[in-house]
Image (tube, rainbow, N blue to C red):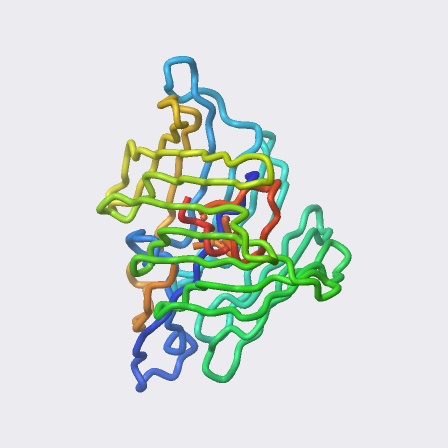
């Protein structure tokens, strides 16, 4: 998909674990699925994008977008594979995590070849201290400092520098509990480059995404709205329609979830964490930043799977 959903992605924490448990699961205190208001023990889901016909009803499958999303037993994303209409893999994201479930990094490959990647570092309190993005050759492209997070562990701010340590921009996100309500990108002198605002229904499903881009010559705002047509027995949406600012249906997305049997569920005390997102982001980190406006992994993760 042209935009990384990765509202990974938004990373969240806070939790008290049962001290009597000694398993790895007992160390985990983040749960991205819960932060997205999804229900049940989801092992994976497939997401397919369709075009709309002249009446706004579902048409043929879009050539760009189909995805298989993998989720671990703690409710955190571990992989995202994108395919075209012929089933050919276009992007294959693999996420790594710290022992507590916090997002650690990702790699994107295609045909066995690396396309990009990101690594993070934390201190002994489990707080982010830095992050680096790498290009397809494994060389440093950008790095991030001054990373802060809210009480749920979702990234709320960062500074981005290029490989030569030239300061490029800052990012700042705001949340209503685990749901992201806004995100602002500013350039190196503090001028706003782009801003995003999100609205949700009472189920925590995003119903509006307002994206504003500011250049020297113009300011443009694009408003996208979403309606949820069907849900499964667990209450998770299975079909969503996307509408442009003229009220025209432009895209329909279908989801099919795979749930783990109840006996596989491990008992643990997990805290909800929020999307990229994700990673700043697919969208790792679902609100989504346009592919033509490269901001950062964190932008994608933060905005990831919300969309």
Residue drawn where x is 45% and y is 64% of the image: 155
Q: Nearer the viewer, residue 45 or 216?
A: 216
In-image side of 195 versus 135 (left or right): left
Identify which residue is drawn at 57% across, 56% down: 297
| Number of disc labels | 0
Q: Is residue 165 left or right of residue 175?
A: right
Picture quadrant of residue 15: bottom left
Q: Position of residue 96 (x, y in %)?
A: 55, 65
Quarter residue 22 falls in: bottom left
- In the figure, 264 relative to 82: above or below? below
Residue 120: give x, y in percent of width and height: 58, 69
Q: Position of residue 261 (x, y in %)?
A: 32, 56
Residue extending furthest toward the left: 202
> Residue drawn 45% across and 48% down?
286
* Residue 296 position within the rendered picture, expressed as x and y whole percent measured from the top left: 58, 55
Question: Please, is residue 96 above or below residue 99 in the view?
Answer: above
Q: Is residue 197 above or below residue 162?
A: above
Residue 279 in view, yes or no: yes
Asked whether residue 277 is in view, the answer is no
Residue at image position (52%, 52%) is 185
Closer-to-camera residue (240/256): 240
Q: Quadrant of residue 164?
A: bottom right
Quadrant in which the N terminus is drawn: top right
Frontmost residue, 119 versus 165 = 165
Quadrant where the C terminus lies?
top left
């Amino acid at each position: 998909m042209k935009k990384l959903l990765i509202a990974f992605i938004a990373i969240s924490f806070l939790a008290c674990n049962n001290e009597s448990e000694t398993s790895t699961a007992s160390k985990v205190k983040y749960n991205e699925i819960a932060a997205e208001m999804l229900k049940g023990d989801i092992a994976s889901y497939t997401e397919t994008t369709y075009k709309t016909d002249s009446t706004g009803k579902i048409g043929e499958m879009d050539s760009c977008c189909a995805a298989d999303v993998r989720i671990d037993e703690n409710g955190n994303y571990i992989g995202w594979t994108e395919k075209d209409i012929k089933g050919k893999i276009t992007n294959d994201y693999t996420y790594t995590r710290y022992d507590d479930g916090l997002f650690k990094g990702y790699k994107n490959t295609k045909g066995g070849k690396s396309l990009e990647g990101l690594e993070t570092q934390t201190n002994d309190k489990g707080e982010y201290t830095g992050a680096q993005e790498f290009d397809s050759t494994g060389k440093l492209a950008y790095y991030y400092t001054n990373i802060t997070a809210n009480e749920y562990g979702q990234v709320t701010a960062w500074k981005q520098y290029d490989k030569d340590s030239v300061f490029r921009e800052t990012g700042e996100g705001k949340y209503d509990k685990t749901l992201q309500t806004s995100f602002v990108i500013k350039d190196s002198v503090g001028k706003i480059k782009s801003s995003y605002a999100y609205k949700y229904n009472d189920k925590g499903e995003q119903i509006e995404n307002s994206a504003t881009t500011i250049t020297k010559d113009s300011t443009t705002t694009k408003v996208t709205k979403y309606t949820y047509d069907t849900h499964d027995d667990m209450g998770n949406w299975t079909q969503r329609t996307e509408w442009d600012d003229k009220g025209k249906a432009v895209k329909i997305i279908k989801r099919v979830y795979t749930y783990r049997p109840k006996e596989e569920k491990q008992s643990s005390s997990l805290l909800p964490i929020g999307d990229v997102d994700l990673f700043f982001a697919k969208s790792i980190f679902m609100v989504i930043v346009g592919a033509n406006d490269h901001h950062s992994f964190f932008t994608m993760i933060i905005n990831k799977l919300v969309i």
